[in-house]
Image: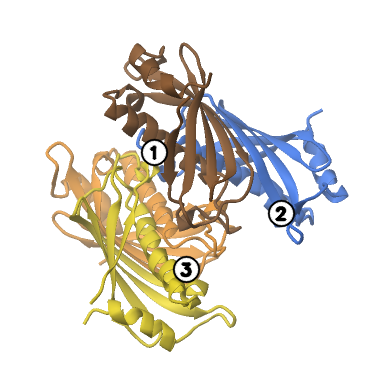
Chain colours: A yellow, B orange, C blue, D brown
Amino acid sequence: MKKFIHNVPVRWSDMDAYGHVNNARFLTLYEEARVAMFFVGAREHGLGSFEEGIVIARHEVDYLRPVDYGDPVRIEMWICEQRAASFTVAYELFDDDVPASRARSVCVPYNLANGHPRRLSEAEREFLRPYLES
Amino acid sequence: MKKFIHNVPVRWSDMDAYGHVNNARFLTLYEEARVAMFFVGAREHGLGSFEEGIVIARHEVDYLRPVDYGDPVRIEMWICEQRAASFTVAYELFDDDVPASRARSVCVPYNLANGHPRRLSEAEREFLRPYLES
Amino acid sequence: MKKFIHNVPVRWSDMDAYGHVNNARFLTLYEEARVAMFFVGAREHGLGSFEEGIVIARHEVDYLRPVDYGDPVRIEMWICEQRAASFTVAYELFDDDVPASRARSVCVPYNLANGHPRRLSEAEREFLRPYLES
Amino acid sequence: MKKFIHNVPVRWSDMDAYGHVNNARFLTLYEEARVAMFFVGAREHGLGSFEEGIVIARHEVDYLRPVDYGDPVRIEMWICEQRAASFTVAYELFDDDVPASRARSVCVPYNLANGHPRRLSEAEREFLRPYLES
């Protein structure tokens, strides 16, 4: 299984009044990695359908240790579950090579024209295959 | 079981490029309600210990329907689980009286002086009791 | 001259690592008031053209004293300058009735169809008139 | 005159409902560059006094063209004015080598112990000197 790896710089403004990266902001860091994989990365494979419509159905985030302003965090991503009409992205977030958070996002491909969830296309399955947890 | 109810105004800037409230921003709306209950609300009961140290160990968020800029959302909160050294807040978020999202946050009381998790105090258990799911 | 008055609740997450509302976030508080006046307020007058296209050409913000998480701030707005193809919004932000910040935004009506700035329409001038500084 | 140059990655979440980087968010991009110069950069010169207390007294921002999610923006900074107890940072923000915004921030060194503005120290003047517009 291949992992998609993306470094996300932490901004000073990501910190909250406790002086650590705010827990809600972790979802923005994960989003930044997800966008890099499913919008920018998929587009380079000629696949624009994720960008036009993925809906997030669920997020789970575990916080292992606080992250502070400083070096970029490294996010590693793969697909931990794939169904006919949804897939789940798993993430690990490393700060100085130490795991600081883990997360999962249930993603639902969506047909914007008729406003309904839809099945994954063959091209989308092809794109996800190398990242699929066995 | 009592619920803690808090209305959170949605800001125009909560919307992302898709024109709906961004999924990461829901955690900020939930945070706003949690702060109202555990910081402001608890302080009115003479209880400042939550404000000095609650660490979030885990969030789970389910997205049921998109929320747009407009009226405040109503967040209802209660305690769905209580252990010796942690408790779990359950939330429902209503947009125009329709459930739009549900979430859970595992909260760990923390001793800032020695940097370790700690047990819930008797005063804290007292504060949580009316909201405890039976 | 009439003032448009809008209360904006301060969120806990508006605070930065210094424990005060972040200076960049003031523009979001001002934006929230501007949207209330030019989108929601104007729409109630049957005027949707501001919402479809106002571009911000310039902001100026003065910071008089720090603002903390707590009560909503009160923002008072009026039009301090009106030209053929732009107008300037002036704001005062009050925290507990004490002025904490002042700002100005140069707003340019925009024709989204052809991508060019445009003159204010008669209906727009009508809407701005009561708020115009003499 | 030397310029301090800092690249700031644009996040997908920096876009607002219009699909461009939100105008308030530009101050966050400028903040990120300012922090790199006055916190991280100055610290490497053994100068921690800016980090302990700079208060922003005023921001001015001009918007020249919209910025979208994509490559990092390049921010160039210098000191356009220096007084006994304040200095003004000037910035230019480039998107694909085209100027997209300009800004100025009036910064006031602050004595956190007694809560008063203070004069620039000799070490601080030394740090600013190469960046001073003549």
- Return the residue at label 3: B100
Gap in Å between the C-alphas at discs 3 and 2?
30 Å
Q: Which type of secondary structure does the marked residue at label 3 adopt?
A: strand
Q: Residue A41: x percent and y percent?
A: 41, 69
- Return the residue at label 1: C16
The structure residue drawn at horizontal position 36% and vertical position 59%, both measured from the top left corner, is A27
Amino acid carrying label 1: it is: Asp
Q: Which type of secondary structure does the marked residue at label 1 adopt?
A: loop
> Which numbered dot is residue B40?
none
Q: Chain of mark 1?
A: C
- Position of B68 compared to A59: left or right? right
Amino acid carrying label 3: it is: Ala
Q: Upstream in the sequence, badge 1 or badge 2?
A: 1
- The mark closer to the camera, 3 or 2, is 2
The structure residue drawn at horizontal position 42% and vertical position 88%, both measured from the top left corner, is A122
Are the numbered discs 1 and 3 placed on the same chain, yes or no?
A: no
Q: Which type of secondary structure does the marked residue at label 2 adopt?
A: loop
* Disc 1 + disc 3, Cβ < 8 Å: no
Mark yes or no: residue B17 visible.
yes
The structure residue drawn at horizontal position 13% and vertical position 49%, both measured from the top left corner, is B119
User: How many numbered marks are there?
Assistant: 3
Q: Residue A106: x percent and y percent?
A: 36, 74
Q: Quadrant of the N terminus of chain C?
A: top right
Mark yes or no: residue A120 visible.
no
Front residue (pair B81, C28)? C28
* Vertical comparison of C104 with B69: above or below: above
The residue positioned farthest toward the front in the image shown: D1
* Vertical comparison of D77 with D108: above or below: below
- Position of A63 compared to A8: left or right? left
- Return the residue at label 2: C53
